Image (cartoon, rainbow, N blue to C red):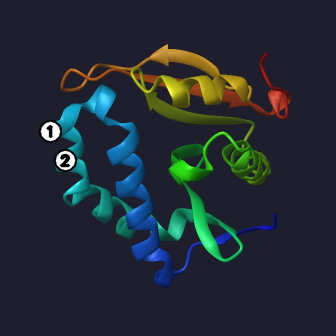
C-alpha cells in the first residue's frame, strides 16, 4: 500500500468535508448526542474545513483521500481517518508524520479531545500522548488537553 501525504489543495475541499461529516456522523453520536452531531454536520463542519484548508495535510492511498490533519502552531486541531481505514495503522502513521513536521519548530505539541471520545483518547495515549488536564466544561461537554514533548517523540504506550 502506497501512502501519499501532502498539503491540502482547493480541489480537496469537497472530499475533506465529506470525510469529516461521515466520521463525525459515525463516531461522535455517543458523546455529542444526535442533536449535536446533526447540527455540526449540517454546516459548521463544512465551514471549519473551508476556513482551515490552508492548515490541512491530507493522506491518500492509491489516489483516495483517507485521512487529514489540521494544525495551528503547535496544536493538532483536528485529525480524522476514514472509518473503513480505522485500526490499520493509518492514523498512527499520519500522526507520526504530523508530529515529526511540528517538532521541527516546537518542543511540545498539544491537542484537545472530548472526554467521551474514548477511542480517540486511547489512540492518543497509545501513541505517547499524555493527558495534561481537563478543560473547562462547555455546554455539558468536557474536553481533555493532551500534550507530547519532543523528548517523548516516537514513544508508544503499552
Residue lying at the far front of the rendered structure: 84
Say if residue 148 shows up in the picture. yes
- Marks 1 and 2, Cα distance to the nearest angstrom? 5 Å
Q: Are marks 1 and 2 in contact (CB under 8 Å)?
A: yes
Residue 154 image point, x, y percent: 85, 34
Name the residue located 42 percent from the left edge and 49 percent from the top edge: 23
* 150 in relation to 50, above or below: above
* 26 in relation to 157, above or below: below
Residue 45 occupies which quadrant of the picture? bottom left
Which class describes the residues within 10 Å of circle 1: few (<14), some (14-19), or many (20+)? few
Name the residue located 67 percent from the left edge and 26 percent from the top edge: 129
Residue at image mark 2: 38
Question: Left or right of 68: which side holds 38?
Answer: left
Count numbered badges in the picture.
2
Which class describes the residues within 10 Å of circle 2: few (<14), some (14-19), or many (20+)? some
Name the residue located 19 percent from the left edge and 47 percent from the top edge: 38
Residue at image mark 1: 35
Name the residue located 14 percent from the left edge and 38 percent from the top edge: 35
Question: Left or right of 8: which side holds 87?
Answer: right
Say if residue 57 shows up in the picture. no
Residue 8 occupies which quadrant of the picture? bottom right
Q: Nearer the viewer, residue 87 or 98?
A: 87
Amino acid at each position: 500500500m502506497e501512502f501519499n501525504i501532502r498539503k491540502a489543495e482547493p480541489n480537496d475541499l469537497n472530499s475533506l468535508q465529506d470525510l469529516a461529516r461521515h466520521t463525525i456522523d459515525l463516531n461522535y453520536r455517543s458523546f455529542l448526542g444526535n442533536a449535536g452531531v446533526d447540527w455540526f454536520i449540517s454546516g459548521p463542519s463544512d465551514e471549519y474545513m473551508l476556513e482551515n484548508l490552508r492548515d490541512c495535510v491530507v493522506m491518500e492511498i492509491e489516489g483516495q483521500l483517507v485521512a487529514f490533519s489540521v494544525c495551528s502552531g503547535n496544536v493538532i486541531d483536528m485529525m480524522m481517518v476514514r472509518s473503513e481505514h480505522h485500526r490499520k495503522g493509518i492514523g498512527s502513521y499520519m500522526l507520526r508524520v504530523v508530529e515529526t513536521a511540528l517538532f521541527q519548530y516546537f518542543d511540545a505539541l498539544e491537542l484537545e479531545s472530548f472526554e467521551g471520545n474514548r477511542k480517540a483518547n486511547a489512540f492518543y495515549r497509545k501513541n505517547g500522548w499524555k493527558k495534561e488536564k481537563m478543560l473547562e466544561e462547555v455546554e455539558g461537554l468536557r474536553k481533555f488537553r493532551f500534550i507530547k514533548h519532543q523528548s517523548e517523540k516516537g514513544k508508544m504506550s503499552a
